[in-house]
Every structure is written in structure tokens, then in C-alpha cells.
Image (cartoon, rainbow, N blue to C red):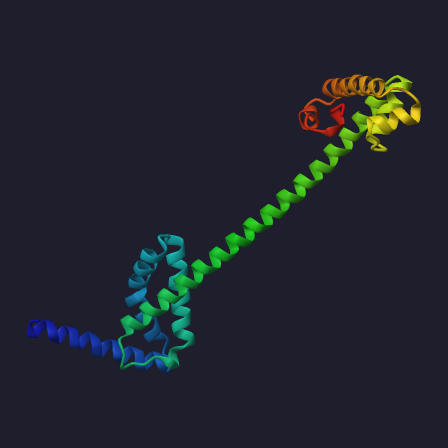
Amino acid sequence: MHYKAMQVYSSEQLEDKDLLIKLREGDELAFVKIYNQYRHKIHTYAYQLSKSTDVAEEIVQEVFIRIWQKREQINVGLSFNGYIKKITLNHVLNHLKKISREKSLQEEVFQLIEVSHNRTEDELLEKELRKIYAEAITQLPAQKKLIYQMSRTEELSHEEIALKLNISRNTVKNHMVEASRFVREYVRKNGGIICFIMASSNYFHSN
């Protein structure tokens, strides 16, 4: 390093030290000079870390507020460049953590809203399904309706129904096959999209 360059470097160090001493004493003019001198450096470093101009600008303000609030703790014997770089890094990391928490919370809220929305839709859908299903059963002939309800509502086996009604098990089976087919077709014609959900329902099976 040339002697002239060393003189300039030493002069800058002394000027910074004088400004920092004045800053520690609460000199607002010294603070403004430091702000103008280091603002661009802090913005550049913050941008390199965050990759966001908006975040970098916010960090600049936060860093200088921190510097002013903690001015009495500044060690004028240490590198101010290193000091502001450390503060900038801490603020960027805190900002990114905050964004991460907010994003996580936002996603959680959206998920809860979606679950609640889906639950409401499911409840409405189930109510509509039950209504159409009940209508289908009322359309069945008396004997088929009785056998179908004994199987579906009372959950009796074909053999138990046959014994109670004093008919053959094969007769019960035939009635269930025909009743299930009728209910399935009724829901398909009257339920629209609902039939796709009902397609896998046990109510559509004759067993």
C-alpha cells in the first residue's frame, strides 16, 4: 500500500472514530453522516442475503434504528464495518424467520379453512344423499321395501330375514338384488354428481 493511500485510509478511520464518538454522545448530525455513509453498504449486503429489494430497504431502516437506540454501546475501538455487518445479518435472519413463521401460520389457517369448508360441503352432501336415498326407498313395493329396510336399517342377514318373514333365503336375495338395483338407478337419475360418491356405498350392494 502506498504511503498516500495509507494516509487516506488512516484519515477515514479517524473521521469514522470521531463520528462514532459524537454518535455515542447523541449527536444527531453525526448520525445523519453515518447514515449517508453506510446506507448503501447495508442495503447491498441485505439484498445479497435476502434477494429482495423491499426487504433490504426495510432492513436498512431497522439497522439504523438499532444503531441509534444502542449508540452508547458502540465500541469505537472496533471496526464499525464489522459491527454494522453483524447487525445487518442478524436483522435479515430474524426477518426471514418471521416470514417463515407467518407463511407457516398462513398455510395452517388456509388448511383449517379448507378443512372446515370441505366438512361443511360433506355435511350438505350427506344430507342430500340421505334425502334422495330415502325417496328411493319410498318408491319400492311394500315387500321389497320391508326386506330392504330389514337388511340396511336393522342389519339382518338374508337368513334372519327369511326366518322372520317365513320365506326362502333365495326370495330374500332376489328382492334385495332388485331393490338395490332400483335404489342405485333412482339415485343415479336424481342425484347428479352425487351418484359418483354413492357408487361405492354399501347401500348399493345386494349382499
Q: Residue at x 69, y 41 (%)?
A: 119
Q: Quadrant of the N terminus?
A: bottom left
Residue 70 showing in the rendered view: yes
Q: Position of residue 105 (x, y in %)?
A: 55, 54
Judging depth in this view, the residue of 20 and 192 nearest the camera is 192
Q: Residue at x 59, y 46 (%)?
A: 111
Q: Is residue 125 left or right of residue 3?
A: right
- In this picture, is 49 found above or below 140? below
Q: Residue at x 52, y 53 (%)?
A: 104
Q: Quadrant of the C terminus?
A: top right
Judging depth in this view, the residue of 135 and 174 nearest the camera is 174
Q: Is residue 42 left or right of residue 95?
A: left
- In this picture, is 135 found above or below 81? above
Residue 25 appears in which quarter of the rendering? Answer: bottom left
Judging depth in this view, the residue of 148 and 158 nearest the camera is 158
Q: Position of residue 46 (x, y in %)?
A: 34, 60
Q: Residue at x 40, y 65 (%)?
A: 91
Judging depth in this view, the residue of 47 and 38 nearest the camera is 47
Q: Position of residue 108 (x, y in %)?
A: 57, 51
Residue 195 appears in which quarter of the rendering? Answer: top right
Q: Is residue 22 left or right of residue 187?
A: left
